[in-house]
Amino acid sequence: MTSVHKTVLLNETIDGLLVHRSLGEGGNENLVIVDATFGGGGHSREILKRFPKAKVIALDQDGSVWNENDSRISFHNENFRNLDKVLGTEKIDGITFDLGLSSDQLENSGRGFSFMKNEPLLMTMKAPARRSLGAGGNPSEYFLTAYDIVNTWSEKSLADIIYGYGEERYSRRIAKRIVDARQKAKIKTTRDLVEIIKEAVPAVYRRGRIHFATRTFQALRIAVNDELRILQTGLEKGFEALTAGGRMAVISFHSLEDRVVKRFYSAKGGSASGGKEHRVANIITKKPIRAGNEEIKINPRARSAKLRVLQKI
C-alpha cells in the first residue's frame, strides 16, 4: 500500500526527542529509539536520517503498514500496550507516540473509520478484523467492532460512550435513534450510521463547521480499540524502559488523549498533589507545541495536533 500519510510535527518531534543528543549530551552513538506507532514510518526514517547508527524498534498493530527494507528498523506487529514484551529487559534512549488515526487508515483501510466513505462498520486498528471458529465451533479469536457496538449495546451504554469519548452534546438523541433503527434492520455500514446520526441531530448542527458525525465516529473508534486505557499503559511501559536522560514525545489529536498525556507528565514531573509527589522526570514542553500556519496549509490534520515532551531524570 502506498502511503498518503503526512507525518505531523515531524521536525518538532525529532528535535524534542533527540536534539540534546545532537548537542553532545550522552553522545549519539548506538541510540535505541522506539517508534510506538510506526504508521507511514515518517518518524523512524527521520530518526535514521539524523542518526544513521541508531536502532529503531517500531511497533504497529496494523501489520499492513510495514514495507520497509532497512536492517536498522526492527518491526513488531504489536500494540504498544505490549511494549514490555517486545523490549524484554532492553533499555531505550527515546520513544515517540503519534496517536490517533493516520490518513492511510482513513483512505485505504476499508474498515469504516471515515464517515465520508461507505464501508463496513469495523473501526478496528487490527488488520483485518475477523471472527474465526475453533474446534467445536467456539470462537478462537474475536475482535470487537463498531458493528457489534451499534447493534448490541444498550441505549444507555451507547449514549455514555458517545458523550464520554466523543464529547457529543446530542449523544442521547443519537443513541435512541440507533436503537430505533436497528430494530428494523442491522446497521452494517458507515453510510447507514451517518444517515441515522443525520436524522438524530438538529438541522443547524448538520450545517456546523465540524461534520455532524465526527464525534460519534471518534467515540466508537476509541471504544472499539480501548484507546485511552491502552495509552495510559503504553506511557507507563515506555517511561519505565527509558534510560536516565531518555525522552518521550507524544503527539495527540483530541482533548481526551491530550488530557491523559498531560496528567501522566504532571505526575512524573512532580506537579501533582501540589508538587509533593516525588519528581522522576522533567517536563520539556511547559505548553504543547502546535503546528505552524505553513504546515496547516499543507496538512489540515495538523491543526489539532499537540506535541508534549518529557525527559526521565
Image (cartoon, helix red, strand yellow):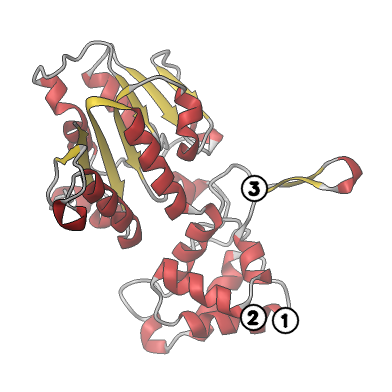
Amino acid type at mark 2:
Val
Q: Is residue 244 left or right of residue 123?
A: left
Q: Is residue 191 left or right of residue 70?
A: right
Q: Tag on residue 271? A: none
Tell me how far mark 1 sits from mark 2, CA to CA. Answer: 7 Å
* Quarter placement of the C terminus: top left
Amino acid type at mark 3:
Ala
Q: Is residue 21 left or right of residue 163?
A: left
Residue 4 in view here: no
Helix, strand or loop at mark 3? loop
Residue 13 quadrant: top left
Which comes sooner in the sequence, label 3 or label 1?
3
Helix, strand or loop at mark 1? loop
Percent position of residue 97, x then y: 34, 40
Amino acid type at mark 1:
Gln
Residue highlighted by disc 3? 129
Residue 89 quadrant: top left
Residue 126 in view here: yes
Residue at position x 45%, y 44% in the image: 104
Residue 72 quadrant: top left
Q: Residue furthest right?
A: 136
- Of 299 and 63, the residue lying toward us: 63
Compared with residue 244, is residue 134 higher up or lower down, i.e. above or below? below
Percent position of residue 27, x then y: 16, 14
Residue highlighted by disc 1? 183
- Of 267 and 181, the residue lying toward us: 267
Residue highlighted by disc 2? 179
Disc 3 to disc 2: CB gap under 8 Å: no
Helix, strand or loop at mark 2? helix
Compared with residue 108, is residue 25 higher up or lower down, i.e. above or below? above
Disc 3 to disc 1: CB gap under 8 Å: no
Disc 1 to disc 2: CB gap under 8 Å: yes
